[in-house]
Image: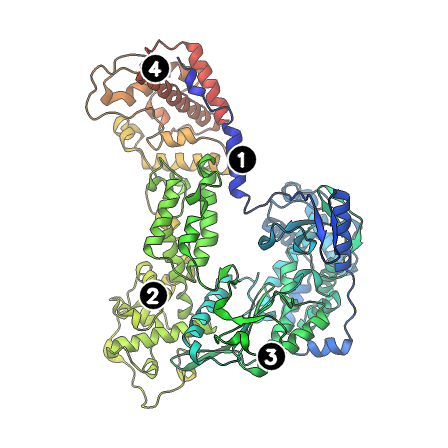
Amino acid sequence: MCQTVYAGEESEGRSKYKAAQLFFQAKKPEQVIFTSLKNEALGIEAKTSPEMVKLATDYYRNLYLSPPQALWNDLKRYLKPIRPRLSGLQRQELERPFTLKELEHALGLMDKSKAPGPDGLQYPVLQYYWDSIGASLTRAANDLMTTGRLPHSFTKVLITLIPKHNVETSKDIKDQRPISLSNTCIKVISKAVCTRLQKVMGHLVGPYQRGFIKGRRIDQNTLEFFTMLDMLKQEESQASDWKAILMVDFNKAFDRISHQYMRQVLIRMGIGGGLLRLIMLILTDQVAQIMLNNFEGERFPLRCGTRQGNPLSPLLFNLALEPLLAHLSVLQGIPIKYEGEVIDHMKYHAFADDVNIYLGNESDYELAAEAIKGFERVSNSRVSETKTKLLGISTDYSRYEQNVLPYPQSYLWSEDLTYLGLTLKGVDWLRFISKLPFMTMKQGYLHIDLITRAVGTNTFVSSKTVYKDLVQCMTPRQLKTMDQGIHKVFKGVSLNKLYARPKKGGYGLLEMQTQMQGHRAAVLVSTLGEATDWYTKYLRLKLTHHMAKIITRRKKTDISRAQGLQCADFLLEQTGRFFKNLEWTFTRKEICYLKAWEQVVSRTRVYDITTLPVVAETCPSASEVPIVSGHRSTLTEPEAMICHPVNFRSLSKKKQEKLLPIMPERFLEICPAAASQRRWEKFWKRLHTFEWKKHKDFKALHHFNFGSHVPMHDTKTSLRGFRCHLCLSPVDSRQFLYHLYTECRCSKVLWDKLNIQAPMNLNSMLAPLNTTYENLRNLNWYVDTVRQVYSSRRREATGGTVLQPLLNRHLKKALERSKMRTS
């Protein structure tokens, strides 16, 4: 009878949970359980939880001891290059009292999934009771600015440990990352301070420090760095003996910063008054306890460092780093050239504690060493003499003798190193693609529900693939391989349904070939604006130089011929004349950017090729070429709208938003009454609310409205002797679906048991007008049970079993199992 319907379903819920846990564990690790911990520097090992807590407490108590006070003259001298950069109005805005609205906005920005601090208060609870708590928290924030005293309840910090990513198997205490769990209220106040500081960070921090600063992106650093590597590779044979990159590695960067130093940096930058008091309270007036394996250690004061886990910590570290970078600005650095003309000199890159220093000559070594030593002396920071790398451009660099910078030195391209997660030798796309979860199946993809699978795939692909692609663009074949690999783990769901937006009935999966085009094209947008960074200047110069080559029809055209030309004429000219012979001027990845632009942007500008500006006989330097000096192209208002950065984001989503909602063709042939587009739009939006926002399992109903999740489809020709496997009535196989969902006696029994008010027919099931939770839930149970029971009976009949009439109790049991499975 129906016994086989339920085989193998008992542990389905548990397997889905474990699969989801496996998939997301790389992104949000669970609490680490330590079985042993070492302090290798002291030769100590602990194996019980109390012993490990004591070992960690002793280590961090010593780390967070108040460092020796820097001599005032040393501190004053080192901070001399820092000038107050804030206007009186900006300082006034920073120091004004907090408002209720500011604190509420800050709470809304917090990651609601983060663990609570010592108070045990989670952000959703704070949000729920905001009307009662908000005014008190606002008063507390303003009291901190005026009194300079931290309430006792705000002072406690729990420190948990997680292994660093590159040394996950190490048990040494120095290889664990301390994460601070502070009082929830103090973190909300800290977030409000962050929001204020973000408005002025562009004035306080130099252009090549980009970590955690609004409007600055990590890919700006990587694009510049790897473009510079390409340039250096080309001039390798003529490289100076001294030209090198110092990749700085700080020991416990966030944990060591001196509070005395931090205070003076803030004052020097023009941050004072109540905001300074509040920031220094958060830094200095707290005590910590190690929490490991649910054991808490003794309390100890935090006399140095910024708290990793506090929202304010990254911005404070940026500000602390700025004096070092100011001292590095006097370096000659590495010249950035195009066609022999110097565009700029690159002296450093910084992203959080990832700092690269670019050395151009022998004196740069002395200046860099002096800047680093001074920074260590006044800030309590320490640069690792073993992990910091000095990488030369010359192949013989490892043999050059110098004793100024005491770090391991080697040839740049001989080292297997990474910069911001990207290997210096480039991206191995075949290896990367082969290791993605949807290619290896190692993380339980097929057991995760489709919505979680789609969200996880988008998150994983967007955060990793796009980032790597901008540095080394994937080939069309590699992009296709990735899309095919993704599709494999959504077996049975067609591409149009996978890519369709969730509010149109799909799963919102990103189509990588479309998505990537927008990200690539967006690289060129800056050339049309006011940006003055060297990478934008470099692109402008190459674009206008290529224009000159096309106009003169000569690959070897002097750079002077680019004078007076505008990038906008290249990028917006309607015939695409300047997109020819791109290999004359551009690298492979730059050609990918241009090809993407050609596909993405509507170009309407008419350009008269006979209007090439008259050029002087002598070749000017690049600095004299207007386009290189930072002058923006002139755009009409419609062109400016077309080239707005927002138009290059989420192209896969935008493409799908233009399409109609999913509607099942065959079902609508049977039931034309359900063919209203508006009806389907309303239904899918309602189902989206339940599935995506409230996490209800309506998969059966969802797929039924795709036109699938049925036990079999209508046949094109009539099958002789065909009978319905539920009611055993003879049926025309060409009209099977109509019978099953309109006439079948057994289907009707299930329908009645669910007390569905509408009559049993397809018009009640397809994009139902009644979109209450109860009705959609009942319909989901109904279509799931019909399919499960029918499929089971069909397998039995195919195996030679003579089917017996179904009893109501069999149908009732089947329905109960469906309820258990989908609840």
Q: Which residue is mark 3?
A: 402
The amino acid at mark 2 is Ile
Q: Up-down: is 84 above or below 624?
A: above
In the rendering, at what x and y percent does residue 718 appear? 20, 21
- Which of the numbered marks, if any, corresponds to residue 70? none
Of circles 1 and 3, which is in front? 3
Of circles 2 and 4, which is in front? 2
Please state which of residues 724 and 607 is positioned toward the viewer in this rendering: 724
What is the CA distance from the residue labelled 3 to the residue labelled 2? Answer: 41 Å
Q: Which residue is mark 1?
A: 18
In the rendering, at what x and y percent does residue 140 appear? 74, 52
Q: Which residue is mark 4?
A: 726
> In this rendering, does residue 679 appear at all?
yes
Name the residue at the front extreme: 399
Dot 3, crowdedness within 10 Å: few (<14), some or many (≥20)? Answer: few
Please state which of residues 627 and 167 is positioned toward the viewer in this rendering: 167
